[in-house]
Amino acid sequence: MTKIAIVYFSATGHTQQVAEAVAEGAKSVAGTEVKLLRILGEDIHEGRWKNDSIIAALNEADAIVFGTPTYMGGYAAQFKNFIDGCGGIWYQQGWKNKIGAGFTHSQGLSGDKLNTLAGLMINGMQHGMIWVGTGITPQGATPDKINRLSSYSGAMAQSNIDQPNIGPGDRETAVLLGQRVAETAVRWNK
Ligand SMILES: Cc1cc2nc3c(=O)[nH]c(=O)nc-3n(C[C@H](O)[C@H](O)[C@H](O)COP(=O)(O)O)c2cc1C
């Protein structure tokens, strides 16, 4: 079995919907086992995130997909706490040669989401991971279109404050990213 872990933070549920769509895409690939792992603020004590069962699941994964809302043009603080909490793994290069990918959700059409994805990608590079982008040519810019926000380094999703669910185009973009990550991980494992 090729193990895909999706680790994410979500305060009000939109990023969770993106994570679930990534999981759906990853599960559609034969031979995969997919885990959704949610970062919670309650696991942060004195400024440091710690959750041994999440770390164990990430350590045994073949691919890790990272997801966070964009806050103030970058990671949500809760997610940054998790990222920094994995510094010891970086020191041992414990995630070297795992497949990596990322996604973010924000309220603004831009909202500086690219900066968040760049942060996720740099974190993956520091860990020695092999980064997988969307690989999707945008199909248009309306909410029903795949990769309507024209993002290549990871999946972007955007919802207005009064919109409870992410749009169909962003959802499908996330499904396709999950599928691509899983296909890459399965090939890499051969
Ligand atoms: C502290 C804070 C900062 C935010 N900064 C941004 C921002 O820089 N750009 C943007 O488009 N949206 C911004 N937002 C909106 C969030 O991106 C949006 O609430 C989030 O993606 C919702 O995801 P969730 O439902 O998974 O929590 C911000 C929200 C908060 C609470």
Image (cartoon, rainbow, N blue to C red):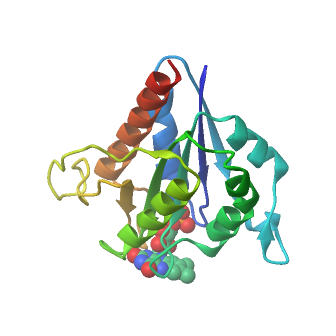
Residue 177 placed where, x, y %?
39, 42
Q: Is residue 189 above or below residue 116?
A: above
Vertical placement of 129 versus 90: above or below?
above
Q: Residue 184: x, y in percent?
A: 42, 30
Q: Nearer the viewer, residue 54 or 166?
A: 54
The residue under the point 49% across, 30% down is: 185
Which residue is more in the foreground, 79 or 127? Answer: 127
Where is residue 179, by image quadrant?
Answer: top left
Q: Is residue 61 visible?
A: yes
In the rendered image, the vertical position of residue 99 relative to residue 72, given as above or below: above
Seen as rendered, the residue at the extreme bottom is 72
Residue at image coords 36%, 76%: 111
Q: Quadrant of residue 34?
A: top right
Camera-side residue: 142 or 90? 90
What's the residue at 61%, 60% (across, down)? 9
Across and down, in percent, residue 123 comes to: 54, 60
Residue nearest the observer in this picture, 37 or 55? 55
Q: Residue at x 75, y 48 (%)?
A: 55
103 sits left or right of 76 in the view: left
- Residue 40 seen in render: no
Left or right: 177 in relation to 130: left
Residue that extends furthest to the front in the rendered view of this protein: 92
Q: Quadrant of the N terminus?
A: top right
